[in-house]
Image (cartoon, rainbow, N blue to C red):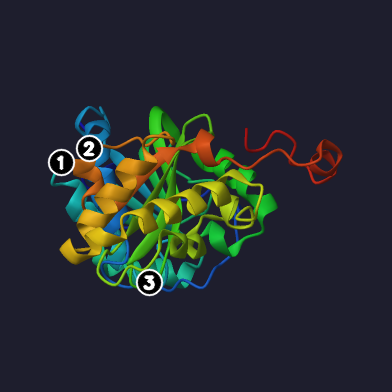
């Protein structure tokens, strides 16, 4: 059972304290957020990976970079508790003013503290899930592997880092599921089907590890091109609604691509594929070594 309340984090509501003189890993980002912005990733987390929380001895979840308002962290806790009543959430922000603004919202099982990619949990505790959304999008691509590694080092052995990007209202999102070894497992594309035009529109929400690779010759570009073709193939189904067209298009994709979820998960406008299908191709090894990124993504 997980620890509820603030006893494992010092004074209730204050969260864990960084080491004296320690500086959080990362830089302050824009911090924009909105209520329900992360509902799609939360729905996927509780639906596709609820077993992680149900089976966890310590169902601790971390929200890295929650922004200027803690609203999506509060929503995360409410949704997690639909699958595990003892779930606890710690929200970390680098900006001390954002932490101070969040503290009045702390409650039993919900704490806020200053921290970054180092995820300064108390000694002996590891997170079952770390959610880091709309954070790395604002960094250089070269910074991504190190950030993954630092966060994944604070995961339980069977834990999961969820890292991705969404639009301002949460209507479109793409995220990675990354294991404790800092290697991605899957990529999930999610969209509000009402008003949806083409799958390639999701390219603008690709995580940092993929967004600059959406060019001809790269697997993610090939995948999105195939998705568009499947979508066009089933254009006649538009008369029955975007959901029917989405399901038919993803069924077609599944013939040639490693789709990881059945119709139940795809029905709301989700599609999860294996990372191996879209992982960036290795660049010239001399360039990778000089940039300090050799074997980063494979």
Closer to the chain start, of discs 3 and 2, is 3
Q: How many marks?
A: 3
Q: Is residue 24 above or below residue 287?
A: below
Q: Is residue 263 above or below residue 208?
A: above
Closer to the chain start, of discs 1 and 2, is 2
**What residue does disc 3 label?**
33
Q: Residue at x 36, y 68 (%)?
A: 197
Q: Position of residue 239 (x, y in %)?
A: 19, 66
**What residue does disc 1 label?**
83
User: Where, by quadrant of the figure, is residue 29 drawn?
Assistant: bottom right
Between 150 and 143, the residue placed more toward the observer is 143
Q: Secondary structure at mark 3?
A: loop
Quadrant where the C terminus sits is: top right
Quadrant where the N terminus sits is: top left
Between 127 and 191, the residue placed more toward the observer is 191
| Residues packed near mark 1 inside 10 Å, few (<14), some (14 to 19) or many (20 plus) | some
Judge whether residue 204 can be spotted in this image.
yes
**What residue does disc 2 label?**
50
Q: Residue at x 27, y 48 (%)?
A: 248
Give how far apart the Cα atoms at labels 3 and 2 are. 25 Å
Q: Residue at x 58, y 38 (%)?
A: 149
């Amino acid at each position: 059972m997980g620890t509820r309340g603030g006893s494992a984090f010092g004074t209730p509501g204050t969260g864990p304290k960084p080491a004296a003189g320690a500086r959080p890993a990362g830089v302050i980002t824009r911090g924009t957020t909105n209520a329900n912005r992360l509902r799609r990733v939360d729905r996927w987390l509780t639906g596709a990976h609820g077993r992680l929380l149900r089976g966890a001895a310590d169902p601790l979840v971390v929200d890295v970079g929650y922004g200027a308002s803690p609203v999506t962290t509060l929503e995360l806790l409410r949704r997690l508790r639909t699958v595990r009543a003892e779930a606890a959430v710690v929200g970390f922000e680098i900006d001390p003013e954002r932490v101070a603004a969040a503290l009045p919202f702390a409650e039993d099982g919900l704490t806020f503290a200053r921290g970054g990619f180092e995820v300064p949990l108390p000694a002996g505790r590891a997170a079952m899930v770390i959610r880091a959304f709309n954070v790395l999008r604002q960094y250089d691509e070269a910074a991504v592997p190190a950030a993954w590694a630092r966060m994944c080092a604070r995961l339980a052995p069977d834990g999961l880092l969820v890292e991705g990007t969404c639009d301002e209202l949460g209507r479109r999102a793409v995220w990675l599921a990354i294991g404790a070894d800092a290697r991605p497992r899957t990529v999930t594309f999610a969209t509000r089907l009402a008003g949806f035009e083409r799958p390639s529109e999701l390219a603008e929400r690709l995580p940092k590890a993929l967004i600059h690779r959406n060019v001809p010759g790269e697997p993610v570009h090939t995948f999105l091109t195939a998705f568009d073709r499947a979508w066009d193939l089933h254009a006649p189904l538009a008369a029955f609604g975007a959901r029917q067209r989405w399901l038919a298009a993803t069924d077609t994709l599944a013939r040639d691509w490693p789709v990881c979820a059945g119709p139940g998960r795809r029905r709301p406008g989700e599609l999860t594929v294996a990372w191996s299908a879209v992982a960036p191709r290795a660049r010239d090894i001399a360039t990778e070594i000089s940039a300090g990124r050799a074997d980063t993504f494979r």
